[in-house]
Amino acid sequence: MPREIEDRVGAFVPGPRVELAGAAEGPLAGLDFAVKDLFDVAGAPTTYGNPDWARTHPPAAATAPIVQSLLQAGASLRGKTKTVELAYGLTGENVWHGTPTNPAAPDRFPGGSSCGSAAAVAAGLVDFALGSDTGGSVRIPASYCGVFGIRPSWGVISLAGACPLGPSFDTPGWFARDAAVLRRVGEVLLPSGGDAPLGPLLKVQEAWINAVPATAAALSGALGAAERVLGPAMGIHLVPETLDQLYENFRVVQAEEAWASLGSWIEATKPQFGPGVGERFAAAKAVDPAAAAAGRRLRDSVRQRVRALLAGGAVLVYPTSPIPAPRLDSAMDMQQAVRERTMGVTAIAGLAGLCEVSLPAAKAEGAPVGLSLVAAPGRDRALLALAERVAEALQLPG
């Protein structure tokens, strides 16, 4: 029988543990990992965080290529981790499977939708874990739980065998407790190339102003560490449209895609949803096509402008999330306000298809806050190497 791992934080999906041994040799030999329960593993159910999804879908017939690549590289799978229902939420709450405990701040949400993967890594249950990121679902739990997390450039890693949400934004991603493991996983999953040195450093003023004072102050030292690696940061204004506009346009495009991806199943099944999830899908169903078309036009504009800015190797730097994780007893309206304020920033990389690494850089109000380094599409390997250098300058695990 495969060995069991103690799950101290409720990170894993309830029920029998899905475990597979990795290859005897390989670049990840000796490492354990977990996968968010929207990636298929042959013979196991993919619940997508919802009991009605699990009930209406058979066990997976094949293993997702990204999971297979990790197994072939020597890493051993130790279980599937909880996700927000249908990956449509940022707090990490799941009323059906239980919300994972945030190991770094037990009175606060772990962040979502890749809540279980972040919690498993933060608790030391596995060396790294796969998640997915559409609107911030790796970056935000990484910030909230005090671990490293990467959203790769859009489209560079296959999402075959993974459940969709917003296909023109969806990316896989992964978490680790140290920068070296984050990079080693990238060396297995990422295409070759994109490793030319990066710089200069660009401080995105809108994102720093958007952060609450405690977060901005806590991250000042981390910014200084990045400057020791890349030189003094140049302050820039990146978003003349305003972060609020980025959020709104990202929201409607993502919502239109979410309904196109999942609406037929929702209409046919009439699934039960936990707080907030059903409301988001109802709003997605009601999106005005003209508003979504305007959102796509804005995305094209942002993508062209930001990619041109970063084409020579420049790196954006800003707080991953404007505030630490909300407390578990936060009211729904407060959670929604945090979601909107946060996604205005996460939409920068989302709309432009950029790669972004969140480093566990500091604590504010007694809880972790992350610092994001963001580079042009295809510069993923160089960004992981840079994150390792900045982590060393911060004396973080490397």
Image (cartoon, grey):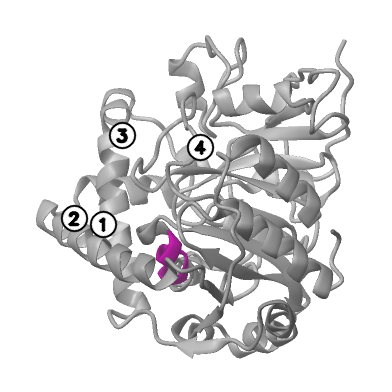
In which quarter of the view is residue 27 placed? top right
- The residue wearing badge 1 is 252
At label 3, the amino acid type is Ser
At label 2, the amino acid type is Ala
**Residue at point 71%, 57% (across, down):** 148
- The residue wearing badge 2 is 292
Q: Earlier in the sequence, mark 1 or mark 4?
A: 4
Q: CA distance from mark 2 to mark 4?
A: 26 Å
Front one among 74 and 246: 74
Q: Secondary structure at mark 4?
A: loop
- The residue wearing badge 3 is 261
Please indicate, yes or no, whether residue 100 appears anywhere in the rendered image: no
Mark 4 burial class by Cα count in 10 Å: few <14, some 14-19, many 20+: some
Q: Does the magenta segment cover residue 249?
A: no
- The residue wearing badge 4 is 157
Mark 1 near mark 3, Cβ–Cβ under 8 Å? Answer: no
At label 4, the amino acid type is Ile
Magenta region: which residues? 344-349
Mark 3 near mark 4, Cβ–Cβ under 8 Å? Answer: no
